Image (cartoon, helix red, strand yellow):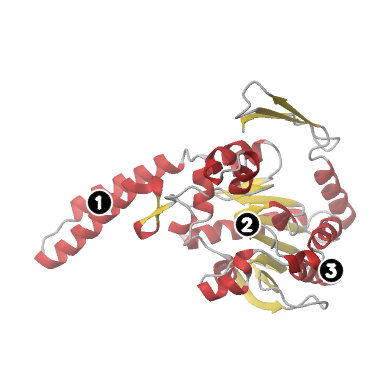
Amino acid sequence: MAPEGNRIGGGYLDFEQKIAELEQQVEELKKLGMKKGIDYSVEIRRLEKDRITELNRIYSDLTAWQTVQVARHPQRPLLTDYLNLMVKDFHELHGDRCFGDDRAIVTGIGQIARNKVLLVGQNKGKTTKEKIVCNFGCPNPEGYRKALAKMKFAEKFGLPIVTLIDTPGAYPGIGAEERGQAQAIAVNLAEMSRLRVPVVCVCIGEGGSGGALGIAVGDRLAMLEFAYYSVISPEGCAAILWRDGSQAPDAAQALKLTSKDLHKLGLVDAIIPEPVGGAHRNVHDTVFNVESYISQTLTQLQRMSVDELVKARYRKWRSIGTDCTVKVKRSDAAKPEIRIVSTPGPAGTRRNSSTAKV
């Protein structure tokens, strides 16, 4: 089982107890002021200042597990928010021309800033009905085939491609496996690596395993500050290593799944800042930051020739993990120490290492 107590009343996370108390005090003073006609503006300003100070303190030093909780916050902006606030004249494209139209992946043509693009995004849904329809953001193979078909369409007409990643992972059902889930993702990896148009990928929430990677092979990969990107969910990792999902916080720390860790390791090209207290506290500013990054990055990529673009993308992805050594120290059988040393290939000279107790 996963750790309990992830959220407290009012949509606050368990480590935001003091924030909840301060905001409750502000609301009570506002109600009291309206009821008695007393001006409490000085006290309210003081409490608001304390709230901002506390938010800055907490969010400047989140643990890996707390970052996962923020990435999963129920009020965090989802694909539909980005479509409504960031994309103009969006026209959705449906179906994979083979099996069906997977609602966990949305594709369509629209305009971001001054750029006409093909947008591919993973959709979790907001209402219970929407969540069920799109498998809570877990795509089926037809979703990945739909995404690739539309990417090929974009390549034909010279449209840049933007992908928004937000999934716990690909759907693990029997039907998905029967229809070739692994093959669909593998084909996407190969085909996206040689698309002859700019491809910008942004992880806006959860980036789970091959489910995320299936639409994440691009010229640039960015993450929102409190998103996470990992080979497996912390709960899944804990279930494998300890056969106990309650060890998820330790697993999250060991997986190095935060934007800071991944940027330090050279796996992520940029970290897009979130407003104070996370994206769920200011959706508009979050979307604006993502839009600005996409616009600036597309401008840079469009200055490159097509051949140069494809070669640079190939070098970028080939340089990841070209020399990776894993050393396991068995001194503590319950929590073995794993040391990972990664040296990129000819595309870069960065040498990284990390040690974790798992």
Q: Nearer the viewer, mark 3 or mark 1?
A: 3
> 55 or 299, which is in the foreground?
55
Q: CA distance from mark 3 to mark 1?
A: 54 Å
Q: Which residue is mark 2?
A: 168
Q: Which residue is mark 1?
A: 45
Residue type, numbered disc 3: Lys
- Please tell me whether mark 2 or mark 3 is closer to you in this view: 2
Q: Earlier in the sequence, mark 2 or mark 1?
A: 1
Mark 1, other Cα within 10 Å: few <14 / some 14–19 / many ≥20: few
In this figure, which residue is indicated by the disc labeled 3? 152
Closer to the chain start, of discs 3 and 1, is 1
Residue 71 rendering spot, x and y as whole percentages: 53, 53
Give the side of residue 87 with respect to residue 96, left or right: left
* Position of residue 46 in the picture relative to residue 138 (left or right): left
Measure how far apart labels 2 and 3 are at the Cα level. 26 Å
Residue at 47 percent of width and 38 percent of height = 61
Contact, CB < 8 Å: mark 2 with mark 3?
A: no
Answer few, some or many: residues within 10 Å of disc 3's Cα (few below 14, many 20 plus, some between 14 and 19). some
